[in-house]
Amino acid sequence: MSQMYFFKFLFGEPSPDMAIMDEVQERSFVPLSFELTRQTEIFFEEKLYPQAFNLLLNVVGSGTISSNEVVVPQPEHLAIAATMLVHPNTTTGAELDAEKEAPNIALRLLRLTHALIGSKNAHFHSAFNFTHFESTRQGTRRDSPAPGETILNDKNSLWATAEDFWHAVGWAFNCSVSHPARWKHWQIWLQFICTVLEDDWNERESEFLGAQQRELAERSEREASQGVEPTEQGTRETRRFRKGNNKEDGLGIIRESLIFKYIASNITTYGRDRRIMRAIFADGQPKSAQFSEVFKNELRKSETKQRSSNSKKRSKVVNVDKGEYGDYQSDSDDEYITFSGRISRKISPPAKATKARPTKRTRRGTRNVMDRNAESDTEMLDADHANDLSSLGGYNSLALRQRLLGLLSSVSTRLPKDFVPVDDLYHMFAENIRDLSLPIFQHFITPSNLPGLTMEAHCGLCELLLYLMRESSAPPSNDDYLTSTKLQQCFLPYGAASPTIANNAKISMLLEAMITILHHENAISATPQLKNAAQAGIAHRESASLERGTVEWSYLWESGVRIKFMLDHILP
């Protein structure tokens, strides 16, 4: 079968022939033969990376239609492929054409293996295993490859150089803010890993639920045949499955998931969960400096790029007689890159005082015009900054952070005693979300932007944020779940405890999100009492925000307009 067929399968709409493939009920998976394994290793040792990956691509895809046997690459080969997605020698520091081409072919192999074989059968659990501290205990140092060594060496791979999964995640998100050239490659790796983690979790959860249903059905049939009433026993059995706190709860297959392995293998015992949160919300600032470079000298450019940059500098003409000084008068050398990736200027020593003719005083009218122009420019910069998502790396970075939060929510729901209770997890979510800038806060709490969280989980997160941010005069509620009455009495009429424009805008956005969720569940209607509470709350929050005409005021006002529109035109 041609490779184009598989590219269409991976990246485009499936062809009609895929229906034939879907009808195959059982498919056997066989390991790569010794001869092909040895040939692949020879290609890797000779740094013929495209040849090695093309060989594996052809082998994996050769028997998908003609037979029911699918060849599974060795976990070591998949580990190398994932490493090449981000290793400096094959990305930003690549010198040879084979090194530059390797990441693209490696990604195709990983996607094809995942699509045809699946996370569990492809043994990603073994391939994507972090062994940094195992190597350290064996005396292996974390160094860059020596001359003659290749990425094949265990100590040079991603899985040995990164301390654990959360170290790689934290560094990747730091790169999304501070090092765009590296983020270009880490983003691809993280997107694939998130897909693997999600599919692996869903597959294991489906198997667990299927086994649970089969066991309950068998027990009910057994008790029915013996004339025993199955109701009470079945209830106890269902309760036993839901506890998930002992060896016989049937959750062993869930505990073997890759995401739980990464959680349980966190390098710290104290503060494990908060370290995970810091990795997901890493923003390139000094507080995120604990997630440092995964590879040594990772930010160093390749020699080819350095020579190209130096040649460009030398190519600038210097002719003193004509007043051409090349880049000698450029102040680029007076700039340095901070940890957060922002450009700052070095402070030059003050020049010697020289007698100069005093400048003519600006006329009053002219000065006012200049001041107004300066204020206008400042407001435009503030507006651009307020609408900017770059403080957390942009949309793609935010989407990946949300996918990881969704995975943690699933693990906490299924394994609360092994990981952390759901309420405690949402408190950690809220701690990291409540102080974000308005555009990023809105992106996190908008229902359509959090596909990884269930509606119930998303509603619980918004409700927790409201409890933390609302004013103290708001009454409590004994209802465990959000209802239209609870929303009307406890949340809609009130503002923020700290009545700044930004905090009131966040309160309004949370109320907007909760109305959307209740509408999606058909649990809310626009009664006169609900409309009055909403309008009173909008007026209260706007009156408490004294500064008008700012970007924060725009967020507050627009959210109130959307709430009114939903009440008048969308809700039944």
Image (spheres, helix red, strand yellow):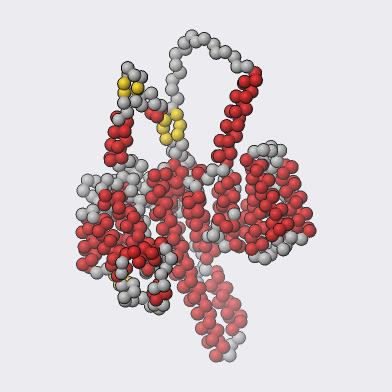
Q: Locate the N terminus by quadrant.
A: bottom left
The C terminus sits in image quarter: bottom right
| 313, 41: nearer the viewer | 313
Of residues 156 and 403, which is closer to you in this image? Answer: 403
Image coordinates of residue 167 in percent, x first then y, are: 41, 50
Up the image or down, 363 lies above or below 421; here it is above
Asked if residue 564 lies left or right of residue 29, the reply is right
Q: Nearer the viewer, residue 213 or 97?
A: 97
Residue 435: x and y in percent read 58, 45
Residue at 70 percent across and 47 percent down: it is: 495
Image side of residue 45 versus residue 3, left or right: left
Please determine whether, in this image, residue 547 is positioned above or below residue 316: below
Left or right: residue 196 versus residue 491 is left
Q: Percent from the top left, x then y, of residue 347? A: 45, 25
Is residue 410 visible in the rendered image? The answer is yes
Q: Could you tell me if residue 421 is visible in this image?
A: no
Q: Quadrant of residue 544?
A: top right
Q: Is residue 385 above or below residue 492?
A: above
